[in-house]
Image: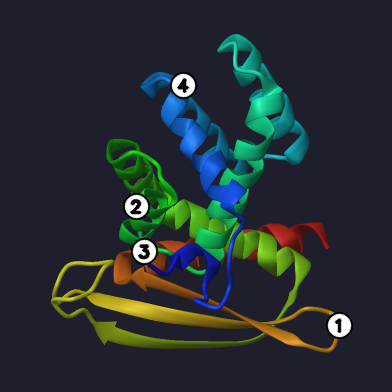
């Protein structure tokens, strides 16, 4: 089965990646929830230094050996970043984790948290991307979901957003997002606020 977070059926992952993810089956539910929360906070814009400090404190407080956790931390980070890059839906996040060997109830938990924070995560990634890369062009189109849509309810309006970014090496990168109409308007307001903040300090 193809893994959505790597974005291509031609790409592969090491066997150790699945082993690292499966190690999360061995911690308690409370420890698992805390571990996932730390990663979501990191993806929402927490500094790497602060994340490192918090994950170290988490391991110490829960008496989890960092030597064993390091591989799981790295693989979990790659999974979440890949899921964001390829705009994975909560259903895709759940499916990928089950495929990688995470228990069903824990995979569902991550899917629920992903759905809950999807807009904030998308906004954070877009803000970080725009701070690093110049926005060259933007395209968008509206659509109405069908009965087979993974993301939204049947018959609801959604918007597909495509941003073309200058990577600074003579090449451009496309970043795609799919948002419901309310999510788009909220996203637009957040981008206008971010732009105003940047203009203020220029």
Q: Which residue is mark 3?
A: 183
Outermost right residue:
169
Point out the tag, 4 or 2, that comes first from the N-terminus.
4
Q: CA distance from mark 4 to mark 3?
A: 31 Å
Label 2: few (<14), some (14–19) or many (≥20) C-alpha neighbours in 10 Å: many
Is residue 43 shown to the viewer in this render?
Answer: no
Point out the tag, 2 or 1, that comes first from the N-terminus.
2
Taking the image as shown, residue 22 lies to the left or right of residue 85, namely left
Q: Which residue is mark 2?
A: 94
Label 2–label 1 contact, CB within 8 A: no
The front one of 40 and 66 is 66
Point out the tag, 2 or 3, that comes first from the N-terminus.
2
Q: CA distance from mark 2 to mark 1?
A: 35 Å
Secondary structure beneath dot 2 equals: helix
What residue appears at the point 36 percent right and 62 percent down from the top-left corner? 89
* Total count of labels: 4
Point out the tag, 1 or 4, that comes first from the N-terminus.
4
Closer to the observer: label 1 or label 4? 4
Secondary structure beneath dot 1 equals: loop
Q: Which residue is mark 1?
A: 169
Outermost front residue:
15
Q: Please determine whether, in this image, residue 144 is positioned above or below residue 72.
A: below
Q: Which residue is mark 4?
A: 31
Residue 39 is tagged as none
Closer to the observer: label 2 or label 3? 2
Q: Please determine whether, in this image, residue 61 is positioned above or below residue 195.
A: above
Point out the tag, 3 or 1, that comes first from the N-terminus.
1
Q: CA distance from mark 1 to mark 4?
A: 42 Å
What residue appears at the point 40 percent right and 42 percent down from the top-left corner? 102
Taking the image as shown, residue 26 lies to the left or right of residue 154, namely right
Is residue 88 shown to the viewer in this render?
Answer: yes
């Amino acid at each position: 089965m193809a893994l959505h977070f790597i974005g291509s059926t031609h790409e592969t992952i090491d066997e150790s990646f699945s082993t690292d993810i499966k190690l999360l089956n061995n911690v308690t539910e409370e420890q698992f929830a805390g571990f996932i929360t730390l990663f979501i906070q990191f993806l929402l814009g927490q500094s790497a230094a602060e994340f490192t400090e918090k994950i170290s404190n988490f391991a110490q407080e829960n008496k989890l050996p960092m030597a064993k956790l390091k591989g799981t931390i790295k693989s979990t980070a790659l999974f979440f970043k890949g899921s964001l890059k390829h705009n994975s839906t909560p259903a895709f996040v759940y499916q990928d984790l089950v495929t990688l060997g995470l228990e069903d109830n824990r995979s569902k938990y991550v899917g629920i948290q992903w759905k809950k924070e999807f807009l904030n995560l998308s906004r954070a990634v877009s803000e970080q991307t725009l701070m690093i890369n110049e926005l060259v062009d933007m395209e968008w189109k509206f659509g109405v979901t069908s009965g087979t849509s993974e993301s939204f309810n049947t018959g609801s309006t959604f918007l597909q957003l495509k941003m073309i970014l200058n990577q600074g090496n003579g090449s451009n990168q496309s970043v795609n997002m799919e948002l419901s109409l309310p999510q788009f308007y909220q996203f637009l307001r957040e981008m206008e606020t971010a732009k105003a903040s940047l203009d203020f300090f220029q």
